[in-house]
């Protein structure tokens, strides 16, 4: 593995490439990544990089967003199978139909959506800035898609905005049931429960802290507590264990993984750099429409 890491680092500097890795990736990918974080952090890095090549160790919508932000750069997704089941729950036509049922309402899309969908929305958001983005619209009522759970969590947090949601969801986060939390709490009564807002509402209600991937990691790292039940993808617990050996992190249920996020291996990253694969392209017209939606988010959450 050390030899492969060395070869990736050499190729990376020869090609003036940057590697962006989401916290749900296999943990060894951090050895070659320049930036590791949540969706917002990575899109900020993508927006300001001066590298010629961006390798996105994540899923398709992330690499596609990076390409929209960097039309002249080469953006690579090491495994072309790495999609997002939630993003695939709404396409352009389904969005148009959803909007036509609620005419005239501001439309917010989660960054976990395709370029075609972003092109028809007013602004996008990630889990770490969703509340701020919806607030920035100063509207009484908005449409939110595709994640119904993130949308409803934002509605609860704000209290004064009606959020009409599309019925999309993350299958990984929905695997967590309220009973999983309750039985873990019984086993570890002192542990704090940290949950992602993509979780079911009944799960979120049982959490001590709700936030994005980076939010959860920051909370656990800075907290004086020593034991945490982690209600999100396994990659977060793996990194927390690695970085906080004096604390205990219990993944709320076994094998809580997003299989799409786990496709990428170090070997795939090497192949991506060596053979320029798999290059992401976005239709020019769609990209031009979608960039406004992403830029507005970056502006609001500066
Ligand atoms: P964040 O990176 O915003 O925490 O979102 C998690 C996720 O599911 C990414 O696909
Ligand atoms: Fe999509 Fe859920 Fe996987 Fe994130 S964890 S990439 S939302 S399927």
Image (cartoon, grey):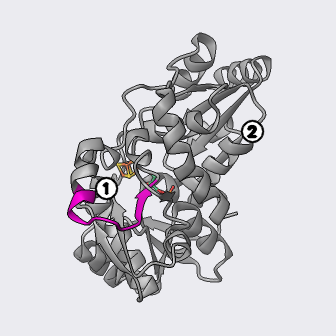
Name the residue: 40% across, 41% down.
114
* Relative side of 39 to 178, left or right: right
Q: Is residue 269 visible?
A: yes
Q: Residue furthest top?
A: 275
Q: Position of residue 290 (x, y in %)?
A: 50, 43
Circle number at residue 49: 2
Reply above or below: 275 against 25: above
Residue shown at 34% from the left, 52% from the top: 255
Q: Earlier in the sequence, mark 2 or mark 1?
A: 2
Residue located at (66% from left, 34% from top): 19
| Residue 183, horizontal then vertical, whole percent | 27, 78
Circle 1 packing at 10 Å, graded few (<14), some (14-19), many (20+), is many
Q: Is residue 289 above or below residue 267?
A: below
Judge: label 1 CB < 8 Å from ligand 2: yes
Q: Which mark is residue 170?
A: 1
In depth, the one of 233 and 160 nearer the eye is: 160
Instruction: Look at the image and give the residue range highlighted in magenta.
Output: 98-110
Q: Quadrant of the C terminus?
A: bottom right
């Amino acid at each position: 593995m050390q030899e492969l890491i060395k070869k990736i680092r050499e190729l990376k500097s020869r090609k003036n490439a940057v590697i962006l890795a989401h916290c749900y990736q296999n943990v060894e990918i951090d050895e070659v990544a320049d930036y590791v974080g949540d969706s917002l952090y990575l899109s900020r890095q993508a927006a300001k990089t001066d590298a010629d090549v961006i390798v996105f160790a994540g899923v398709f919508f992330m690499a596609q967003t990076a390409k929209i932000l960097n039309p002249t750069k080469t953006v690579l997704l090491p495994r072309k199978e790495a999609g997002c089941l939630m993003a695939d729950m709404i396409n352009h036509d389904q969005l148009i139909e959803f909007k036509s049922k609620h005419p005239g309402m501001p439309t917010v899309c989660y960054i976990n959506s395709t370029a075609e969908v972003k092109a028809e929305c007013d602004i996008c958001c990630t889990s770490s800035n969703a509340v701020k983005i919806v607030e920035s619209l100063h509207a009484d009522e908005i449409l939110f898609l595709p994640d119904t759970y993130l949308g409803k969590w934002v509605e609860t947090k704000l209290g004064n905005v009606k959020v009409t949601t599309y019925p999309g969801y993350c299958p990984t986060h929905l695997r967590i049931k309220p009973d999983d939390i309750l039985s873990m709490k019984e086993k570890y009564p002192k542990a704090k429960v940290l949950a992602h807002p993509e979780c079911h509402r009944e799960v979120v209600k049982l959490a001590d802290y709700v936030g994005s991937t980076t939010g959860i990691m920051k909370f656990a790292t800075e907290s004086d507590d020593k034991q945490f039940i982690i209600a999100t993808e396994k990659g977060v617990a793996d990194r927390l264990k690695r970085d906080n050996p004096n604390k205990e992190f219990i993944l709320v249920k076994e094998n809580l993984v997003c299989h799409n996020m786990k496709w990428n291996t170090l070997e795939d990253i090497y192949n991506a750099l060596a053979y320029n694969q798999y290059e992401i392209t976005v239709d020019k017209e769609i990209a031009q429409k979608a960039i406004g939606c992403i830029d507005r988010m970056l502006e609001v959450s500066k």
